[in-house]
Image (cartoon, helix red, strand yellow):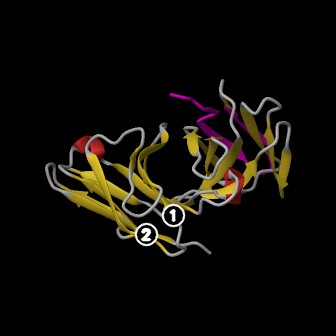
Amino acid sequence: DVKVTQSSRYLVKRTGEKVFLECVQDMDHENMFWYRQDPGLGLRLIYFSYDVKMKEKGDIPEGYSVSREKKERFSLILESASTNQTSMYLCASRNPVGAPYNSPLHFGNGTRLTVT
Amino acid sequence: TQLLEQSPQFLSIQEGENLTVYCNSSSVFSSLQWYRQEPGEGPVLLVTVVTGGEVKKLKRLTFQFGDARKDSSLHITAAQPGDTGLYLCAGARGVDSNYQLIWGAGTKLIIKP
């Protein structure tokens, strides 16, 4: 089974702090994603990466950056945390082979970030 | 921005009742995925529907893709407390492996014993 591990389940940070959210997958997947999840808004894509060293902006990249130096690791960085970034953050990976129906997303268990 | 409207947003019913969750869009999708998320965990894929009109069954869950591939439904028969969770639909845009997903807002389902 694919395992996607997010380093922290809960984080509390202060406004203005630089925050790192780490995600590691163990199945050699090329694609990795960062989403935030807020009640009533579903999943919103922040950034994604098709392969090592590659990154693409999603729908809500403002205030975030990412790093993918190794295939298995995808980091989300909040350069200066703000209270409106309080949310659940979900990392996902995917093996992009074949048609879309053969390559669903595999998610980690999420990091609940609170910025005070 | 493409939208995928999911309804209802919240549903609380008694064990044994039936229910249907809907996902509707004005856009055509190449396929549509349904995920379930339990508290404290990430979403897990339940099923993918690909062909217009396709029906897939997973025990008491029946998934249908609309003929025009713009909408989908999830029907649960005789709901059980174990069905409690957040159900998410996601429409795939693109036909190659680097497709994009458009997400519904989710349906929070509570089944009371």
- The quadrant in which residue A7 appears is bottom left
Residue A93 spot, x, y in % from top left: 52, 61
> Three-letter amino acid code at disc 1?
Glu
Q: Residues within 10 Å of mark 1 (few under 14, many from 20)?
A: some
For this view, does A92 lie left or right of residue B70? Answer: left
Q: Quadrant of the N terminus of chain A?
A: bottom right
Q: Is residue B109 visible?
A: yes
Question: For residue A9, which quarter of the picture?
Answer: bottom left
x and y, in percent, of residue A110 in the image: 43, 60
Q: Is residue B23 above or below residue B87?
A: above
Indicate the secondary structure of the residue bearing disc 2.
loop
Q: Nearer the viewer, residue B2 or A90?
A: B2
Q: What residue is drawn where x is 56% and y is 44%?
A: B100
Residue B78, x across and y down, in percent: 82, 50
Q: Kindly identify which numbered label has been placed on residue A71.
A: 2
Instruction: Decide if residue B113 is in sight here.
Output: no
Q: Quick check: A45 left or right of B94?
A: left
Residue at position x 69%, y 43% in the image: B32
Over which residues does the magenta segment extend? B1-23
- Tell me, yes or no, whether dots 1 and 2 are on the same chain: yes
